[in-house]
Image (spheres, grey):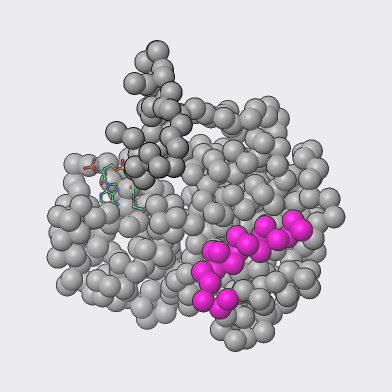
Amino acid sequence: MSAFKEPVVIHRGLDNVYVEESKICYIDGEASRLFYRGYSIEDLAEHSTFEETAYLLIYGWLPTTSQLEDFKRQIEAHRPLEPEILQLIRSFPYHSDPMDALRTAVSALGLYDPQPMPNDMEARVDKGLSILAKIPTLITAFERLRNRKEPVSPKSGLSHAADFLYMLTGKEADSYDVHVMEVALILHAEHEMNASTFACTVTASTLADMYSIITSGIGTLRGPLHGGANEAALKTVMEVGNVANAESYVVEALAQKKRIMGFGHRVYKTWDPRYLILKKLGEELAVKKGQTKLFDTAVAIEMSTLKHLEGTTIFPNVDSYSGVVFHMLGIQTDLFTPIFAMSRVAGWTAHAIEYLYANRLIRPKALYIGKTGLPYLPMQLRTGRAEE
Ligand code: ACO
């Protein structure tokens, strides 16, 4: 018998539950619109940089020239890793998943901060910025070490996107590749109260430190229903292999009630506007890199999925082409989710700061449907199963 006397509504998955008021991001999931601090994602993707977008999300306004320069200087100053952190990354097993490596390394950054705990606004901004700056260095250090190469130190004067690609390969990347990475980072920087941002907000609500907050976000982003979908989507495109196989793959997958990765969204019930931007970039990149077969296969999967799911609200999301785009940039598949984290840390930080203005511990309830009042059994009377 339930211990509850009144009817209780369970919001499984917290669908349509509002947990705070926010000025950071607005999604109109019916009209395919996305705004960061009031600016459309299309304008930001076309005109902004990742640094400027991160500034906008964290501070709330588009920076002036001097504000942006100062912000970039701070990021640059925070990019290098403490020798102890590098030593720690060297000790990671090479077969580790880069998301596990990143989660562990970000958590460890807190150990080397002499004052990780202050929780005022200023500390949340400073520490969030420092973590944001270091994530590309952490990802690339692990990537190089597991490939038996020495990490490459950050290079002064490069943008966040350019420096990431530089530290990955040891060579400055082609300007078009930098542009594509820049846009991808802008598109992934923020997305309202998604699962990882909610995880960060829950941790922030306990007045924990920024290292714990961001580590919570990374752990949550890792799953295939969230950040991990981009890897899964690319794997699907690779497995399908060519345009001719797409239709049978989709028919079979849907018949087996499998989810087509990169499709569907809790909030968008039409096109994800980020998908449209990435698809266009992907098309240009495919021609430039001579990888049209991969891109065309992704398009064929998209077309078949849309045909067979016509009449539903399942449309392509950002992950349907992000994996294909990252792959064409020469990036290892298991780095896609870490790259997502490298970008989303801007949004996580913005939410951790905003939540502090009216902090309230997040503590929902679970409806207990188990038994109460069971007699405590001595060992010889136990059945080794749950009581019926
Ligand atoms: N392929 C096939 N069917 C799907 C898909 C899909 N990608 N997504 C949802 N459906 C179906 C479900 O099977 C379900 O059908 P049913 O009612 O017959 O059981 C129905 O649509 C509703 O599905 P829900 O899981 O309730 O919808 P929800 O709003 O929770 O879905 C989610 C959101 C988890 C993203 C889902 O669409 C999914 O699993 N997609 C694939 C993974 C993915 O691409 N994730 C990335 C999301 S974007 C991001 O995190 C950056």
Q: Is residue 88 above or below residue 274?
A: below
Magenta stretch encompasses residue 98:
yes
In this rendering, would 283 be left or right of 17?
left
Which residues lie in the magenta part? Answer: 93-111
Q: Residue at x 62, y 53 (%)?
A: 215
- Please provide percent x and percent y for residue 273: 41, 48
Q: Nearer the viewer, residue 182 or 383?
A: 383
- Please provide percent x and percent y for residue 375: 43, 28
Observer able to see residue 304: no
Q: Nearer the viewer, residue 366 or 69?
A: 366
- Please provide percent x and percent y for residue 232: 37, 63
Q: Residue at x 49, y 44 (%)?
A: 195
Q: Is residue 59 above or below residue 306?
A: above
Magenta stretch encompasses residue 4:
no
Q: Residue at x 20, y 48 (%)?
A: 309
Q: Nearer the viewer, residue 18 or 148?
A: 148
Give the quarter of the figure containing the C terminus: top left
> In the picture, residue 371 is in which quadrant?
top left
Q: Is residue 11 above or below residue 105?
A: above
